[in-house]
Amino acid sequence: MVRLKYAKLLTILVFIVNVILFLYTWKWFVSESNNYSTTVQTKLLKIKDRAHSTNKHIKKLITIVFRDFYHFENDLQHSIDSILNQIPNIQIMVLYEDEPYPPLNFVKNYTATHSNVKFINLNFDIRKTSKALSPLSQIRTKYVLFTPDSFRFGGRAIIQKILAEIEKKSNRKNVANSRNTDIDASSSDQNINIDSLAKNDNSKSIIIIPFVSNVASMSNCCRINIDIANWTMEYISIKNSIHQCDMFLQKHAILADTSLLKIMPDALASPFPEMFYIQAKICKAKLHFLKTGLLQDGKRLFTAFHNKQRRKEIRKQQFKNMYKKIQIKKVVRKYRGKINDRHNKQHEKKATRDIFGNAMPAIVLSNVSIPILINTEYFGCEKNTRSCIGTVFRKPFYVYLKRNTPPCCLEKLKSVFYHVLEELTNVGIRYWLDNVALKSAIETSELARDAFEIDISFISYDLDRSTLLKKAQTRPVIDNLGFYWIKATEGQYFRVQYSKQNQVGVNLLPFSMIGERVRANGFFGWKAKEFSAEFLHPMSTVIFLNKNVMTVNNVCDFLSLKNIT
């Protein structure tokens, strides 16, 4: 019995010990699990706080602007959503010129639920204040990120890389400027302009963020040359040359300092971003490229032929309006490369587009010399419009603006000259190049930069040899090529114009030989000065506009006689 009691007691003790060990073990596991969950929650809160802090920092620095989109086909809603999903309260502006019709359904949803998303019409509205008509006055952040339509926002890391890049460029400029001598404080405020701001301001860095879908084998960059005096702009396509790049050609986003936008005449003007790049060139801003953190494309747009053509026509009209606004009459595009038809067919869908949206020839490098393909287009006067020169009182208006003759008018003046020269030569009329045109022929063999007309004198006895001149004596005549032959109402001289509407032309001045003197026949003024017939015996020739043209002998004495120096 005693052994049985001891055995029971031992069993009870073992059970109690096991229960105690179980309780302590269970309590330890519970405390550890609580500590682990607390640690996890703490880490999650830290991540959320860090993300919130990053978002807050980005919102203070950047405003995102959508400037280039088309209401008849776009991916704007999904592009905005991709941003709001990552940075909910960031400021977003959608700028447009014409009110979308039919209206975009998602606009009301955004304006009702997101106060940070604004849709702004850039067209003039007399009911709006000047601040409402100027989106730049509503931007409070240091930087503006211009994003194209149809893209997907990958995350905050891309924005952080962009900000780090532009801050790095600004710091480099500050160090460089600190080493230079201080600007003379005696400069007056009246002389401050864009050029001086471009030299002294440190915020002239523009960051280009390319898209992943860009074709590496195509031209990325374009150099812009602007010749205001000659009404000319030149685009030179270059391949991946960062230091010479004035405009990026393929799909990309742009980060710029808000202060840079505010010193531009119209930073948000269409076509965007081409007009922006032209103003940046004048402001001497520098482009820098973000090599990492490329942007992702959204939905593919303009796959239908109808919408593609509609977009192309809109772009063409935008460029015409832009050149008219900045007073550019001649546009030259230079593509350096060799056209390979098979290569072009394979890359037709991915080919680089020029600024009008037309496919550019692919650049194929080879061991042979690479030709330069030049395309010239004029945006000034035409056959059915008035000339850009207008009415002339002693001097053309552009001389007082320190500019030369518009290139469109020069080309039309050359066309009229070639046509008149062919007519006079074919019918056998004795003529000679005269006055200012003769002086230009002797000096440069070309037209003077401020030329607005060409004078050709002829012997009046030969007038009946030309049917056109005979008809023009009684009434104006339009020949088979559309040139307008007319007799002046004041005086007996003739004028051949480019067309009835476009008055650019050549003057035909009749002279009569009376004995040893040559006198003007029926017209007056300094051009009608009498001179000796010895200047016409014998006749001489001069090269003018790549043509052998008849002229007087002893040209220098002849011009001196007419006081043309």
Image (tube, grey):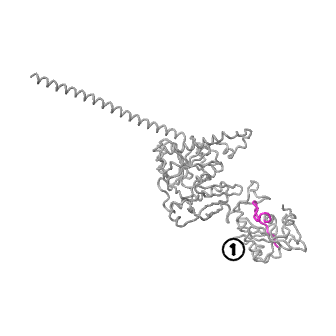
Residue 353, image quadrant? bottom right
Q: Residue furthest top?
A: 2
Q: Residue 460 placed where, x, y %? A: 83, 74
Residue 550 is one of the magenta-drawn residues: no
Q: Residue furthest right?
A: 515
Q: Residue 383 placed where, x, y %? A: 68, 66
Q: Which residue is mark 1?
A: 480
Q: Work out which quarter of the rendered image holds the C terminus and state it.
A: bottom right
Q: Residue 47 placed where, x, y %? A: 44, 37
Q: Work out which quarter of the rendered image holds the N terminus and state it.
A: top left
Q: Residue at point 69% right, 55% down?
A: 227
Q: Residue 313 placed where, x, y %? A: 57, 60
Residue 464 against residue 437 in the figure, above or below: below
Q: Residue at point 66% right, 39% down?
A: 178
In this view, the residue in front, 418 or 118, is 418
Residue 277 against residue 464 in the figure, above or below: above
In this view, the residue in front, 492 or 409, is 409
In this view, the residue in front, 513 or 369, is 369
Residue 32 against residue 393 in the figure, above or below: above
Mark 1 residue crowding within 10 angstroms, few (<14) / some (14–19) / many (20+)? few
SS type, badge 1: loop
At label 1, the amino acid type is Asn
Residue 450 is one of the magenta-drawn residues: yes
540 to the left or right of 229 = right
Q: Residue furthest left?
A: 1
Q: How many marks?
A: 1
Residue 360, image quadrant? bottom right
444 to the left or right of 46 = right
Q: Which residues are magenta?
A: 441-458
51 to the left or right of 537 = left
